[in-house]
Amino acid sequence: MIPHKCPKCEGLMTEGFIVDATYGANVVSRWVEGPPERVFFGGLKIRGKTVHHVQSWRCQGCGFLENYAPK
């Protein structure tokens, strides 16, 4: 694995993830294509949209976060 360098301070980046807490579970954040559309009971419409899990990298030096939603 090629180490990532921080675009702000050139420190080393560590891979991690951002947790979304939901009803009784912890899940990885997801990126959803398009603007948010509300559905009944205050949720968001996801069905039929492109969805990617979010990868996150944190700089060990300055704490900068860089997020990716790879295919």
Image: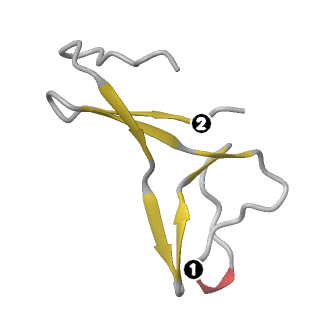
Task: Give the label, 2 or 1, closer to the camera.
Answer: 2
x 44%, y 39%: residue: 56
Q: Is residue 67 left or right of residue 53?
A: left
**Disc 2: CA contacts within 10 A as few (<14), some (14-19) or many (>=20):** some
Q: Is residue 40 left or right of residue 20?
A: right
- Residue 20, placed above or below residue 65: below
Q: From the image, which quarter does the C terminus lie in? A: top right
- The label number, if any, that marks residue 69 in the structure image: 2
x 41%, y 18%: residue: 3
The picture quadrant where one finds residue 45 is bottom right
x 14%, y 29%: residue: 62
Image position, residue 39 (x, y; %): 68, 74
The picture quadrant where one finds residue 28 is bottom right
For label 1, the SS is helix
Q: Which residue is mark 1?
A: 42
Distance of label 2 from label 1 (alpha carbons): 25 Å
| Labels 2 and 1 touching (C-beta < 8 A) | no
For label 2, the SS is loop
Please, what is the three-letter code of the amino acid marked with disc 2? Ala
- The label number, if any, that marks residue 67 in the structure image: none
Of callouts 2 and 1, the N-terminal one: 1
x 76%, y 45%: residue: 50
Pick the residue in front: 51 or 25: 25
- Residue 31, placed above or below residue 24: above
Outermost residue toward the right? 48
**Disc 1: CA contacts within 10 A as few (<14), some (14-19) or many (>=20):** few
